[in-house]
Amino acid sequence: MLRYILRRLAWSVPTMLLVTFLVYIALRVGTDPVESYKRVNPRASRAKVQQYIDINGLDPNFVQGYFKWLKNFITGEWAPSIKGRREVWPALKDAMANTLRLGTAATVVGIFFGLVAGVLAALRPGGKRDVFINTSAFVGISIPPFISAILLQLLFAVYWQRWFGESLFPTSGVYPAGHTGFNLFLMIKFMALPTIIVAIQIIATYSRYMRSSLLDVMNSDYMRTARSKGISERRILIKHGMRNALIPVVTIAALDVGSIVGGLIITENIFAYPGMGLYFLKSFGEGDFPLLMPWMVVIVASILLFNLIADISYAWLDPRIRLE
Amino acid sequence: MPGSTQGSALSEQREKVSSPRQMALRRFVSHKAAVVSCIIIGVLALFVILAPFTARYGVNQSVQAPPNSFLSPRSNAWLGTDDIGRDLYSRLIYGVRVSLLIGLASAVISVTLGALVGAVAGFRGGKFDDVLMRVTDLFLAFPFLVTLLVVRNVLGGLPWLKPLTGEMNSVRFIIVLFSIFGWMGVARIVRGQVLSLKEREFVEAARAVGASRRYIIARHLLPNSVGPIMVALTFSVVGAIISESTLAFFGYGPQAGDGATSLGILVGAAKGAVQTGFWWLAVFPCFVLIIIALSINFIGDALRDATDPRLDRGV
């Protein structure tokens, strides 16, 4: 197992290099970093522009430029953002922390309720409860997050205020303007709506996964054997059913990190929540190459990491699988 | 009632000899939500095709002389008006027309492309297959919006693609973009289908008789994958419509000329209407988008059940 993990980690280095190289090319073709630098800083001297090109590795030759960028990236000589010359790492770090908070909250809430709903649906397939949960999940999947965001904002923030004098949930930010320090209550209040919106998608997806996975397991031979041995229905469900049904679900959860981040990007933007999504859309809109590249590296690294976690958890949960 | 028993007896007799297509149709019709969805989509399509008759105003026409902005729903503007006094109901019809066009066009192109690539990859295997699957995995692992935006800019940044794609904010560009995107998911599905089909006896028989690869793919593998391909087609339509709205919502969507609109542009305008409390601007476009997405998804779901012969035992 350890050898497998080490080998996978070793493999992830060339993968990382290849993918970041592709991203580098895509960003250079797509956003034209030098042009956007000149657009944002119209009065920059030629020396300044050349310095910007040097530190970011924006040579005309893509391969050379990439390795230049890579060297500066690894040695920690990150270029400042093109607008206002801000340090990139503090901004990226804050964005990561905020997104991690929102993402974890939404994932925990979403997976918990999704699994519960899936189990409830699978216990009596075809029953009223099953139909209700299944249809709701279907509706939940069909509604894109920005639509539910608009509608929930309209209801809980704007119209709630008109009807009851005070809005139930605010529509933007982490804290009210000018607030400093830590306040759990305020934070929950501000994060409730974005969390719900991301969680709706997760609940809808996982209740379906869990339902079909548990149904597969429930119809398997070892379940019948367990029943014939006289083990109680509850024990069968928990020890035999849930445990085995969770294997594919856990794997999907780890592989799904990309789509969860996708939902976060949209939600963060609507709620002006200062996370990775807002960071990306802002810097992408301005063509801010120094801000964008590290962001991409973080995303690629986390996708690779979660892929690895998926494979390991698969082997760990299912003893029949041997990783070589 | 003798008539009805006779009818059911007749249909029973017919069921015994029904072809796979008839059985699929029967399974589809038994899916009530899908039938209702078909009717909804049909009515919507009629409204959209007959736009000159069903819309009450031109796409860019205001309902009355100023003051006419942000009128709440009333008799001369059933769903209210927007910031410059245009009728939301009429604009929704024109908007759905553009969105459905984008959805259908990009779905047809991407599914055709994806089915061919997937069939070849699954049938030939080897390096082509490996590279293709790696690329697909990579694209699909990234957050969707990020890839969409980056690829959009890359497409717009390649001058030699201009004749094909047109301007970056044209409807044609969006269709090309979604086609480039959409084929990967389809290719993966068709590849999986072909991988399992190509080991089957009838393919082996065809090969033994000396059929060419192209013949086997065109006459055996693709026709037998028609179910999953149809399902992929319906889901691609929804995917494209939602992607268009997402892009437009974030200001990267099509800017159809002459005030022409799309569902995405209307939903994007809803963002501004939330804070000010002009609820009709948010609720109606969102509602139409949800109805379309839900209906097509139901149809796709029923198609999947209907075209999967393994599911017939229970019926």
Image (cartoon, coloured by chain):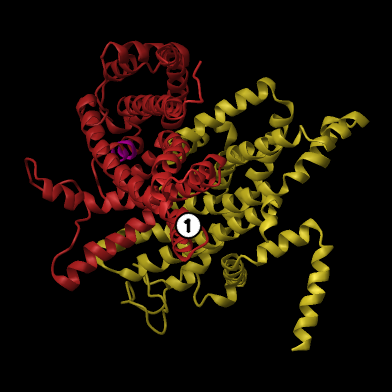
Q: Is residue B295 above or below residue A206?
A: below
Name the residue at the front extreme. A229
The hue used for chain B is yellow
The spot of residue B52 in percent (x, y) is 58, 73
Q: Nearer the viewer, residue B88 or B288?
A: B288
Q: Residues within 10 Å of mark 1 (few under 14, many from 20)?
A: many
- Mark 1 — residue? A138
Residue for point 34% across, 42% down? A265
> What is the tally of numbered marks visible in this picture?
1
Q: Report in which chain the residue with disc 1 lies.
A: A
The spot of residue B64 in percent (x, y) is 39, 79
Q: Is residue B245 left or right of residue B229?
A: left
Residue A61 seen from this side: no
Q: Nearer the viewer, residue B312 or B255?
A: B312
Residue for point 63% across, 43% down? B110
Q: Is residue B205 left or right of residue B222?
A: right
Per the rendered image, the range of residues in magenta is: A277-282
Label the magenta part by its dominant secondary structure. helix
Asked whether residue A249 is drawn in magenta, I would say: no
Residue for point 71% across, 64% down? B26
Q: Is residue B212 left or right of residue B197?
A: right
Q: Answer with the quarter of the image where residue A280 lies.
A: top left
The spot of residue B180 in percent (x, y) is 58, 39
Give the residue type that dot 1 points to: Phe
Q: Which chain is red?
A: A
Residue for point 39% across, 44% down? A238
Viewport quadrant of the N terminus of chain A: top left
